Image (tube, rainbow, N blue to C red):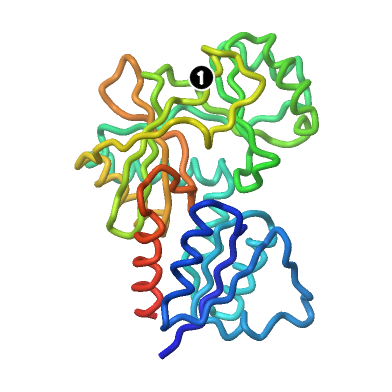
Amino acid sequence: MVKKIVFSAKQDHEVVKKLISKLKKIKKFDLLLHDPSKEFFCLSDMPKYFKSADLIIAKVRNECSIDLLHFAKLYNIPTLHNVETVLTCKNKIALDFALRKALNTHQKELRNFSIPKSWNQSLSNIPLFKKWALPKLPIVIKSHYQHDKYNRFNFLVQHIDEVDTFIEKYKEFLYYDVYIQKFIECDGIERKVYVIGDRVFGIKRENPIYKYLREKPESIDVELLEREEFEITEDIYKLSKILSTELNLKIFGFDLVRPLDQDKFYLIDLNDFPSFRGIPNIEKELMNYIENYALTL
């Protein structure tokens, strides 16, 4: 039986392009591609193909992606990740709640992992924010929502006057809540763990903040940072399985850093459909998982 698959993603993404090429070759798939950055909906006349889909896969780009997942929920259309899961991962505060709950629930199994101290805050009153932030430095100010790359930032504040630099650069965010993490002084390496079903892959690269501290560039294109594989330990594999279960995730990635003064990892971020860059032939792994998953529905 042929399965109708909707794959919604920005199609100029390197891994996505290769994955699409492989999905098109699956004879049991009738594949419809949707680009959420270009193709929008007539809400009173949604395409019949969406309603009759056997599976909708969304690599979330913007609110259009979220809209499609809401539509899928309303019409009981299977999705790789449901809208509740994606909304949790999109919202840094909700994600923080979920990650802390998972680690607290599995304290014994995950004793070698922690999450940085964090807050949600507003910068609408700058003097008040500086007074609040001063005893907590260094901190990293992050955007509340993470799926829109044009409104996404990580900004290190080591000295209180650097708040003024943030305000100058991101003044449009002064009336939005931001997510703030305590900065973890680490070995300068960011370990990115990618999960596809039962398969877990590790890529490490220089932490962009440390590159900034060393070179002070105007901007950093994280996609250009050199990557290399690292071995997934039993502890990291266990963490990936627990996060998969607790957050209802099938394909996802998360970031770990190792502090200088502790023999553990800090979990600093998670993404429900990451870039997967740096892993050889990752598009084949993704294709195999999606094919097997769709054919079991």
Report the quarter where the C terminus lies.
Answer: bottom left
Give coordinates of residue 106: x percent, y percent.
Answer: 28, 44
Report the quarter where the N terminus lies.
Answer: bottom left
Residue that lies at the very extreme toward the bottom in this rendered image: 1
| Count of picture labels | 1
Q: Please, what secondary structure does the residue beneath circle 1 have?
A: helix
In the displayed structure, 265 sits above or below 193; it is above
229 vs 32, left or right, is left
Residue highlighted by disc 1: 211
Which residue is rendered at x = 55% and y = 69% of the image?
A: 7
Residue 235, image quadrant: top left
In the displayed structure, 62 sits above or below 50; it is above
**Residue nearer the viewer, 85 or 133:** 85
Q: Amino acid at mark 1?
A: Lys
In the displayed structure, 218 sits above or below 296; it is above
Residue 259, image quadrant: top left
Give coordinates of residue 150: x percent, y percent.
Answer: 70, 41
**Residue nearer the viewer, 252 or 3:** 3
Which residue is rendered at x = 70% and y = 30% of the image?
A: 122
Which residue is rendered at x = 71% and y = 21% of the image?
A: 166
Give coordinates of residue 97: x percent, y percent.
Answer: 48, 43
Neighbours of disc 1 within 10 Å: few (<14), some (14-19), many (20+): some
**Residue nearer the viewer, 238 or 193:** 193
Give coordinates of residue 186: x percent, y percent.
Answer: 39, 19
Which residue is rendered at x = 61% and y = 76% of the image?
A: 74
**Residue nearer the viewer, 273 or 215:** 215
In the displayed structure, 102 sits above or below 245; it is above
291 vs 33, left or right, is left
